[in-house]
Amino acid sequence: ERNQIENMNEIRLEIAQIYKEIYKINHARVIYENFINKKSPASDSILARSYIELAGIEEDLSNTDKAVEYFKKAFAYINDGVEIKPAALAQAYFKYALILDDFNQTQAALDFYQRSIRTEKDENIYLSAAYTNIAEIIKASGNTTKAADYYKLGLKIDFERSNYEGMYYICLKLAQLYETSLPEKVLDYLLKSLSAAKRTKEPIYITNAYIELGDYYFGKESYTKALKAFLLAKKHISEDDDSSSIDLRIDDIKANVSQDLIDKITDEVNKNG
C-alpha cells in the first residue's frame, strides 16, 4: 500500500509540474501545500521536493523570506539523508545561493554555488552560471587570476553546450577583467564575444559587442577601426532602441579623421556589413 501511495504522489508531482509549465501556478501550489500540510501522506523525498518547488514559486513572486524558509526546510531533509535527483538538488542550491548573493551574504553564497557544482554537473542547467557567479565574488575580493579561472570554467561549459548567449557574456567579462591585469588579451576576448553574439542572432548582443569593440579601438586611437565598429553597431541596433550613445561616439571620432575617410568607411559598411 505504501508503494501505491508513493506512486500516486509521484503522479501528483508530475501533474503539478505540468501546471507550472502552463502557468497555472496556483494549481501546482495546492498540490505541494497538500503534501507539506500533511493533508496527503507523503514520504520525506516527496516533502523535500515539494518544499523546493514551493521555494521556487515564492522566489519567482519575489516573496524572498518565504522562499528562504522553504529552501531551509527542504535542505533539512537532505541533511538528514533524504535523497532526491541530483539535478533538482543542484538547481535548488544554485537558486538559494542567488538569494544569499543578492543579500551580500557572499561567503554563504559561495558555499551554495560550490554545492550546486559538486552535486551535479552533466544535468545541472545552472553549472556555467554557478562558475560565473563564483568568479564575480572572487573578482570583487581582488583575486583576478582565480576569478579568470572560474570564468573560463563557465566558458568551457557554455562552449560544450553551444550556449552562445553565455559565451558572449563571459568573454565580455574576461575582456573587462584583463583590462588592467593582461591588456594584451582584451581584444581576443572582445572578438570572441562578438563572434558568440552573432551566433545568438540577437540584435541587442550584437550591437553591444560592436560598441565594446569600438570603445576598445577608440581607446587605442585606432579611429578607423572604431568608426567601423560603431557603424556596425548602429546597423544592427533594433528599431525600437535609442542609438544616441552610438551617435555621440561617432561624433567623437569625426574630430580625429577626415570626412573622406568617414564617407569611405560608411559606404563600405553599408555595402558589405
Image (cartoon, grey):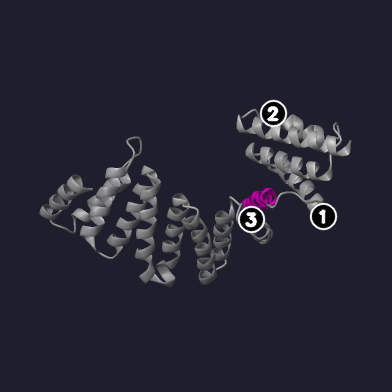
Left or right: residue 156 compared with residue 262: right
* N-terminal label among 3 and 1: 1
Instruction: Please report the residue visible at 28 percent of the width from the left and 61 percent of the height from the top.
Output: 217
Instruction: Please report the residue visible at 79 percent of the width from the left and 36 percent of the height from the top.
Output: 7
* Front one among 254 and 222: 222
* N-terminal label among 2 and 3: 2
- Per the rendering, the mark at residue 104 is 3
Report the residue that reaches farthest toward the right. 1
The stretch in magenta equals: 87-105
* Mark 3 residue element: loop
Contact? badges 2 and 3 (CB < 8 Å): no
Crowdedness near tag 2: few (<14), some (14–19) or many (≥20) residues, C-alpha within 10 Å: few
Amino acid, disc 3: Asn
Which residue was labeled with disc 1? 81
- Per the rendering, the mark at residue 26 is 2
Q: Which quarter of the rendering shows the N terminus?
A: top right
Foreground disc of the pair 3, 1 = 1
Contact? badges 2 and 1 (CB < 8 Å): no
